[in-house]
Amino acid sequence: MIATVVPHDALRCGTNNPSSGPGITTLAFWHGYTPDLGRDLLRPDRVAEYMGELAHLALKQVPVTVARQARPGMRDRLLNEHGAGEELCLALRSAQGVWGVLCLMRAAGARPFDDADARRLAGVGPALVAAFRGYVTASPATSLPPEPPPGMLVVGADSRIKTMTPQARPWLAAMRTHLAVPEWLADCSFSCLAAAAREHPRHLRLCVPSVGCGWWTTIEAQRLGDDGDVAIMIQRATGTSLMPSFCDWYGVTARERQIMQHLYSGSAPKQIARALDLSVYTVGDHLKALFRKTGTSGRDELIASLNT
C-alpha cells in the first residue's frame, strides 16, 4: 500500500507506544533489506545515535527526512558500504506522541527521493499510526491463554546472548511465530536493548502488545555489575506494568485512565466519583467508553484483562 504512495525497494518500520518515549521499538516490520545491512543498521553502538536521530526528527514540523540530505552520519556510511541508495525516514507521531519510525530505501542508481516523495510520505503518517493501533487492538482486551513462566537471558559485553534459561525459549519462539521475524532480527533487538540498558541509569522496561507473542509482555533489561553483561527478563505484563502501554494502544484518555486506575485499586464508581469530584453518571459514561474501546463487557472483564 505504501509503495503506491512512494515507490521504494525496501521498507523497515519500528513501533512503540508513546508512554515509552522515542527509543527501542517493540514491534518491527522489515521487507527487502538484506540481513547484513539489517544487522549493521541495528548495531548496538548505533543505539544512542539512532535514538537521537528519532527524537530530532519527531520535533520537526514535518517529521520526514532523506538520509543523504541530512548531516552525513554512520547510517549514510553503512548504506554506502552495502551498495544501497537513500533512505527516506518518517517519524510516526500523533497527538499522543511518537509511535516509532518508518524508513523506505531505494537501491543505488535508482531515482533519488525528492520533496514530493517526502510530502506524500508525511501524509501517510496519521493513517499508518491508526493502522498499527487497529492491528494491535483488533482483538478484545480479554484474558488470554496461560503463558510460559518468566524467562531470562544474559547479553554479554560482545552483544551476543551468553546464556538463557529454558523458560526463555518459549517466549522467543512465540515472538518469531507471531511476527514471523528472522532470527537475526530478534538477536539484534536484544543486543540493542542491552546497549540501551548500559546507558540507562536504572533498569529499562518495554511492553510488547499481545500481537507480538500472544500475550502482553514486559521485557526488562538491567546491567549486571561493571563487566558489560545485561540481564533481560521476559514475562507476562499485568497491572501497573501494563497500564501505560495498554492505555496508549487502546486510545484511553487521561480522565479514563484515572478512572481505570481507581477501578484497578478496587474502588467502586461512587468512590471514584468522590475522589475525582465527578458525578456518578459521568463516571458511568467514562466506564462505558472504556468498555467500548477495549471490547470488554464490564468492570470485572476490564480488570481481568490487566490481571490475568
Image (cartoon, grey):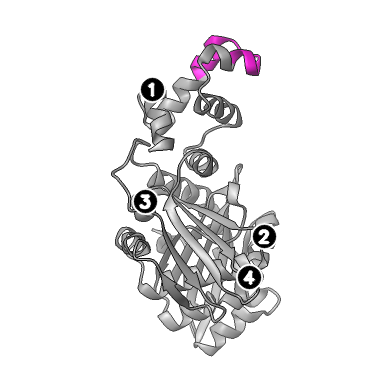
Looking at the rendering, in which quadrant would you find the N terminus?
bottom left
Principal secondary structure, stretch drawn in magenta:
helix
Residue 283 inside the magenta-drawn segment? yes
Instruction: Using the image, tell me which numbered label, if any, was put on residue 49.
Output: none
Query: What amino acid is found at the position of numbered circle 1 in the picture?
Result: Gly
Crowding near the residue tagged with mark 1, few <14, some 14–19, many ≥20 C-alpha atoms within 10 Å:
some
Instruction: Classify 105 as above or below 26.
Output: below
Instruction: Classify 37 as above or below 285.
Output: below
Residue drawn at the location 41% of the way across and 47% of the way down: 216
Instruction: Using the image, tell me which numbered label, if any, was put on residue 298.
Output: 1
- The secondary element bearing badge 3 is classed as helix
- The secondary element bearing badge 4 is classed as loop
Of 189 and 99, nearer the camera is: 189
Instruction: Classify 255 as above or below 200.
Output: above
Q: Position of residue 167 (x, y in %)?
A: 35, 61
Residue drawn at the location 35% of the way across and 59% of the way down: 171
Residue denoted by label 3: 211
Instruction: Using the image, tell me which numbered label, if any, was put on residue 55.
Output: 2
Of 95 and 200, nearer the camera is: 200
Residue denoted by label 4: 225
First in residue order: circle 2 vs circle 4: 2
First in residue order: circle 1 vs circle 2: 2
